[in-house]
Amino acid sequence: MLKRFVELAFTLVGASAGYYFGPEFFGLLQESPLNFGEVPGPQYIGAVLGALIMFVTTFWLSNNVVKWIRWSEERLVKIPAADGLFGALGLIFGLIVAFLIQQPLAQLPIPGVNRVLPFIFSGLLGYLGFRVGYKKRDELISIFTLGRQNKENKLKKEEKPYVEHKILDTSVIIDGRIADICRTGFLEGTLVIPSFVLEELQHIADSSDVLKRNRGRRGLDILNKIQKELDVNVLIYEGDFEEVQEVDSKLVKLAKVLSGKVVTNDFNLNKVCELQGVSVLNINDLANAVKPVVLPGEEINVQVIKDGKEHNQGVAYLDDGTMIVIEGGRDYIGERIDVLVTSVLQTSAGRMIFAKPKLLEKAL
């Protein structure tokens, strides 16, 4: 059926071209040395000849045209409705802009160029409009959604308070401390778990490496615990950003779309969010903030576990895991001793305390 339609379309095009160009064609034949004489009804004869020529041409072209049409149909069917809609809106906007600038271009005092440029600009602006509408669909949807939500919030301000979205990344899910934080009630709002993060967790859980497989399964167990055991609102975000490959970049873009905050303990993602102007909640920073404050000059009783990197150093740990480097503590490995804090080094990766044995202080 489609092949017949293509043949009919080509035939009609040939007939139309023959109808309009037939008189000129036969006029040229009359002026030629052969002098064919006047042809009655040149437009009708031209239409018949044009239709026959194009009909014969379809024997070679129709199969390729049908394949191209079906290939285009398959590609268009696979495009999501929202993507196609915003791409079409961008195309229409680009063609409108091209139409507005066609008149100035047509008045250029350059023969030939003033006829070609309008077509070039129409194609270029139409293409750019489609690409911009297709690429920016998520942001446009968020703008429309935000406008609708703002209107609903004005009407239901007292009934429905604002809910902030906290977007979880893969590292903070595998870490597991997010479940304990949610249980304490310090994290408010809705926890957003993107589908691409779930896919990454599933890939890790299916890894052939035992360590990675255990970490992935631990992350899935933590999510199941948060969703079923804790009194927390959990939202599974089904959308995806196909033009973006990296999961971290997708998280940043989702945070912009939802106007939410990224929850992570990844140092690199933390820096990327700060550069992109996205709010971020770092679990490591929270853990460091709630650790007991230790000031230089304070006395601590610790057990020396092992020797340090430098000569004659010993290493101990507080209950929260903070490392204490003890100058001259190598001789006390395996013993509990009192030490005096000399300095505290605070970094994004954690905190390190430098101290020396109190016995040495008394000896001095």
Image (tube, rainbow, N blue to C red):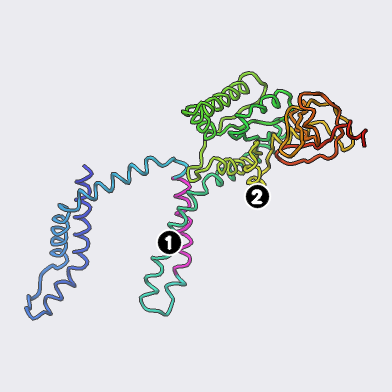
* Quarter of the rendering containing residue 220: top right
Quadrant (top left, top right, bottom left, bottom right) of the C terminus = top right
Q: Secondary structure at mark 1?
A: helix
Task: State the image coordinates of residue 158 (x, y, percent, origin top left).
Answer: 73, 32
Residue at 68% x, 40% y: name it. Answer: 280
Amino acid identity at mark 1: Leu
Q: CA distance from mark 2 to mark 1?
A: 33 Å
Task: State the image coordinates of residue 77 (x, y, percent, origin top left).
Answer: 37, 40
Tell me if residue 137 comes above or below residue 210 in the rendering. below
- 30 relative to 203 in the view: left or right: left
Query: Which residue position is annotated with label 2?
Result: 275
Q: Residues within 10 Å of mark 2 (few under 14, many from 20)?
A: few
Mark earlier in primary sequence (2, 1): 1
* Quarter of the rendering containing residue 233: top right
What's the mark number on residue 16? none
- 307 relative to 171 in the view: left or right: right
Does the segment drawn in magenta span residue 65? no
Query: Which residue position is annotated with label 1?
Result: 124
Q: Which of 173/185 is in front?
A: 173
Q: Which of 221/45 is in front?
A: 221
Tell me if residue 229 comes above or below residue 293 in the rendering. above
Q: Which of 357/302 is in front?
A: 357
In magenta, the rendered stretch is 84-102
Task: State the image coordinates of residue 325 (x, y, percent, origin top left).
Answer: 77, 35
Q: Report the mark closest to the observer, 2 or 1.
A: 2
Q: Residues within 10 Å of mark 1 (few under 14, many from 20)?
A: some
Does the segment drawn in magenta span residue 87? yes
Tell me if residue 11 comes above or below residue 305 in the rendering. below
Quadrant (top left, top right, bottom left, bottom right) of the N terminus = top left
